[in-house]
Amino acid sequence: MFEWAYDGVNASIPRNVGPECANYLSPKRRIIETALISIFIIGSLVWGYKRIKLPTKVSYANNDRVGRRVLLIIMSLVLGIEIGFKFTSRTVVYILNPCHITTAMQLYLLAADPSPTVTAIFRIHLNFLNGPVLAYLFPETESRRIFADKAMYWIQHGLMVVIPYYLLRIGGVYNVEPLSDMSWCIFSYGINLAYHFWIIQAIALPIQVNLSHMLCAAVLDPFGGQNYRVWTFVHQGILCPLLCKLFCYGSDFFLTKFRLTRVKPSLECVLSKQNNSENNEKLIEDVNTSGNGHMHVN
């Protein structure tokens, strides 16, 4: 019934689709791994949710900017073209890849009115930046047969890094937790694992398409073998929070400290205009005099 969504997947690419990939791990092995990681997922979500906090001193005024609208239009076009290529090539199932989900989150962040929900989604999605980084380090464009389709691959993943930097430049609701706070990282990693093991795996197994390498290891995977998913669980558990914290630290340095790119006094501040510099100074005072400037999420 749904063959139109995946029967265009290129079977000539090793470990891309088919029974050999689906049988890479035994059913018993998959069940045990999924059960053990599910325990970790539930623990991470519960532990993280109890500790995540949102700032109390944030202006929720709609600070609309031309750059935000331009990025919204560009990314919408890129994702629309990507989806169009997926339909024409009968590989719609690839829309479920994590980078497309993260792109949809970024479109929401660019389009939504300021709110605590926007801040929460922004902080969560920063922990998914391993997607574009790995896409550039280990590109998978063999199944993209035309130049335009391959170009969209590079443009989309590049924009996925540009957009959060620009949003941090705007500031306001687009803010991050202190570098020492790991609650958002752990909570987000739980979401990431839940999506892979509970959703992608459940879809990939019956159709035998290696979505996000949940069925079998990539040919070039240095951790290939029967334990490849365990190794992935470990190294991505390190990489995801590490990239998030490095991105936040680098953004803070270039936006608030580096002389050539400094645009505002603090990362939490709304990007200053000529008439709101005093408001930014007042916001800094409020944050500095109100504990850690955060509140628990209800």
Image (cartoon, grey):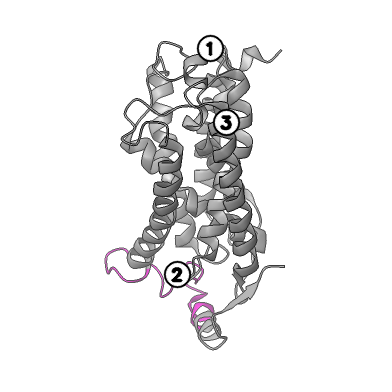
Q: Position of residue 261 (x, y in %)?
A: 31, 63
Which mark is on residue 267?
2
Q: Please rate how many residues cluster around mark 3, counting C-alpha atoms within 10 Å: few if below 14, some from 14 to 19, many from 20.
A: few
The magenta stretch spans residue 273: yes
Residue that extends furthest to the front in the rendered view of this protein:
28
Label 2: element kind: loop
Q: Are marks 3 and 1 in contact (CB under 8 Å)?
A: no
Label 3: element kind: helix
Amino acid under disc 3: Lys
Relative to 149, is 162 above or below?
A: below
Range of magenta residues: 256-281
Q: Please rate how many residues cluster around mark 1, counting C-alpha atoms within 10 Å: few if below 14, some from 14 to 19, many from 20.
A: some
Q: Position of residue 11 (x, y in %)?
A: 46, 12
| Rendered-image quadrant of the C terminus | bottom right
The residue that disc 1 covers is 8
Relative to 244, is 106 above or below?
A: above
The residue that disc 3 covers is 28
